[in-house]
Amino acid sequence: MKTNEIRIFVDEYEGLDELSEMDQQLILEARKIARTAYAPYSHFRVGASVLLTNGQVISGNNQENSAYPSGLCAERVAMFYANANYPNEKIAAIAISALKNGDMVDDPVRPCGSCRQALLEAEVRFKQPIRIILDGKNKIQVLQGIESLLPLSFSRSFL
């Protein structure tokens, strides 16, 4: 038997002022769009802002439904809108922010498994890693590509 180690590198920042202007803009847009999420059941509002390689910023928020799991997460709302309206543009980065009962979450919120898989598909499709910016009140985390969130992933290479 052999044991392998998987390492994940996460850059952590204490606040917005440590980030580039573009990353700050993405986070602020994610925070803004989180406020208008449709979350009458969980009261957990998530916003996601996607930066395309053409400079366009697309935002989305979570949309809950009483017939769970018919709703959709903010990350996929934003990514699917971007892919539908800009089918040939690569996703350069995504910023994700969340509110619980109206207050920003303390620690960065992370994408669910379905959103991680959708991020992986976008990376594979465009052959480019996506910078993932996770926003929280106590810190901001930045990851370089979905492998940091979804190691040992399943992709089209297995089909």
Image (spheres, rainbow, N blue to C red):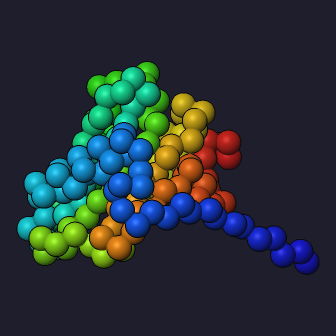
Going by the image, does 104 lie left or right of 113? left
Q: Position of residue 94 (x, y in %)?
A: 39, 46
Residue positioned 54% across, 31% down in the render: 126
Q: Note whether 65 is above or below 48 in the view shown.
A: below
Classify residue 3 by image quadrant. Answer: bottom right
Q: Note whether 144 is above or below 122 in the view shown.
A: below
Going by the image, does 138 lie left or right of 47? right
Residue 118 in sight in this render: no
Between 91 and 125, the one nearer to me in the picture: 91
Q: Position of residue 148 (x, y in %)?
A: 58, 59
Q: Note whether 51 is above or below 151 in the view shown.
A: above
Residue positioned 49% across, 64% down in the render: 12
Between 64 and 136, the one nearer to me in the picture: 136
Residue positioned 13% across, 64% down in the render: 39
Q: How many marks?
A: 0
In the rendered image, the residue lying farthest to the right is: 1
Q: Note whether 78 is above or below 103 in the view shown.
A: above
Q: Quadrant of the N terminus?
A: bottom right
Going by the image, does 35 lie left or right of 71? left
Q: Position of residue 38 (x, y in %)?
A: 11, 58
Residue positioned 44% across, 35% down in the render: 91
Residue 104 in sight in this render: yes
Q: Position of residue 79 (x, y in %)?
A: 35, 41
Between 87 and 92, the one nearer to me in the picture: 92
Classify residue 5 by image quadrant. Answer: bottom right
Classify residue 134 by image quadrant. Answer: bottom left
Q: Quadrant of the C terminus?
A: top right
